[in-house]
Amino acid sequence: MRRLFSTFARGWPGLGLLLLRLVVGIALIGRAVAKLDSGPSFYLAALCVLAIGLAVLLLAGLWTPVAGTLVAVLEVCQIPWHREVLSTYIFMATIAAALALLGPGFWSLDRRIYGWKRIDPPAPKS
């Protein structure tokens, strides 16, 4: 996992990545719950559950490159069936792809689990 991104941005860039993750995650969950309330078919319900799972991963910043890539693919695959809101799906796919490429940022579980660790050698005894 560490090879997918080399740094976990701190400061304002890290905050920007956190905001992007929050926007995509909340929007995915909101849209999936709205679709589930309409009594969808089994296939659509399975896609909604997948979208909610990916949104939770993005919100937590866990496996962000994988989750972002899958969200981008999921959004692009929905374009032929939802042409009336084409810009929404393109927007979500673009942000998810950017998150997959940039990484999760400083405030994420990815950084805590896979981030660079500092190991201090013990001080020599005199």
Image (cartoon, grey):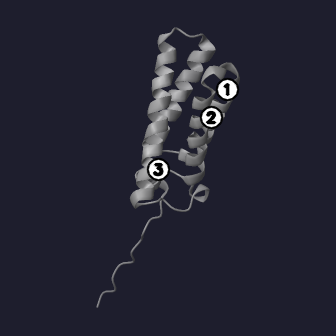
**Residue in view at x 56 percent, y 42 percent:** 95
In three-dimensional space, the C-alpha distance between marks 3 and 1, rounded to whole angstroms, equals 25 Å
Q: Quadrant of residue 44?
A: top right
Which label's residue is closer to the chain start, 3 or 2? 3
* Outermost residue toward the bottom in this view: 126
Name the one closer to the observer, 34 or 107: 34
In three-dimensional space, the C-alpha distance between marks 3 and 2, rounded to whole angstroms, equals 19 Å
Residue ID for mark 1: 79
Left or right: where 91 falls relative to 57 = right
Mark 1 burial class by Cα count in 10 Å: few <14, some 14-19, many 20+: some
Image height check: is 67 above or below 49?
Answer: below
* Three-letter amino acid code at the position of disc 1: Ile
In three-dimensional space, the C-alpha distance between marks 2 and 1, rounded to whole angstroms, equals 8 Å
Which label's residue is closer to the chain start, 2 or 1? 1
**Residue in view at x 48 percent, y 59 percent:** 8
Q: Quadrant of residue 121?
A: bottom left
Contact between marks 2 and 1 (CB within 8 A): the answer is yes
Q: Which mark is residue 90?
A: 2
Image height check: is 106 above or below 21?
Answer: below
Residue ID for mark 3: 17
Q: Secondary structure at mark 3?
A: helix
